[in-house]
Amino acid sequence: MIKKHKIVVAVSGASGAIYAKVLFDKLVQMKDQIKEVGVIMSDNAKFVWHTELQNKDYQKLPFTFYEKQDFTAPFASGSANFGTMIICPCSMGTMGRIASGISNDLTTRAADVILKERRKLILVVRETPYNLIHINNMKTITEAGGIICPASPSFYSNPETFEALAATVIDRVLTLSGLQNNAYSWGEGQ
């Protein structure tokens, strides 16, 4: 029997909406492994999605969306047993607030809950270059049990589209989340 996952996905206003789109597409395909997906999108995330992808297809997703100040969302408490939170893409501001323990919205509150409950927090950070503040915030989150998974695609699978390139990152995120994912693996099938 496959364990069904309860996952929180937060989309910050960082550039890289393609990563969120590919993540959502893959989560839809993995519905047999998922019990529930709760989604938080900042206003800027919606703006960036529309700017970069030229659509509002996130509105068609079969997941439950929560407003950024809705502290009654189930994953605002550890008792709801959401096992994984993915912030994709994750802005440096969001990461900084999480690293500082500032729970000023649902995204940062949910991240705080995931860390305090010793569950999986995965930040798909999307910035370059990093300054020392960014690096120290990454260190703090890593020491607290979070996983920093930079949006740095790989090329050895020879991706031919932007979505395939983004999938090289998202496939790693899904594997880190504990989901069974049939993604390209180095050394297999060569």
Image (tube, helix red, strand yellow):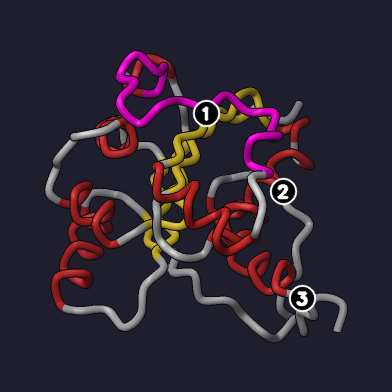
Q: Identify the residue shown where x is 40% and y is 54%.
A: 13
- The amino acid type of the residue labelled 2 equals Lys
Q: Distance between the residues labelled 2 and 3?
A: 16 Å
User: Which quadrant would the C terminus be assigned to in this image?
Assistant: bottom right
Which residue corresponds to mark 3? 161
Q: What stretch is highlighted in magenta?
A: 57-75
| Residue 26 numbered mark, or none | 2
Crowdedness near tag 1: few (<14), some (14–19) or many (≥20) residues, C-alpha within 10 Å: some
Residue 108 left/right relative to 75: left
Q: Identify the residue shown where x is 80% and y is 80%.
A: 160
Would you say residue 65 sits in the magenta stretch? yes
Which residue corresponds to mark 1? 38
Query: Is the Cβ of the residue at disc 2 closer than 8 Å to that at disc 3?
Result: no
Which of the two discs, 2 and 1, labels the residue nearer the N terminus? Answer: 2
Which of the pair 70/27 is nearer the observer? 70
Closest to the camera, between mark 2 and mark 3, is: 3
Would you say residue 7 sits in the magenta stretch? no
Q: Quadrant of residue 153?
A: bottom right
Q: How far apart are marks 2 and 1 (CA)?
A: 15 Å
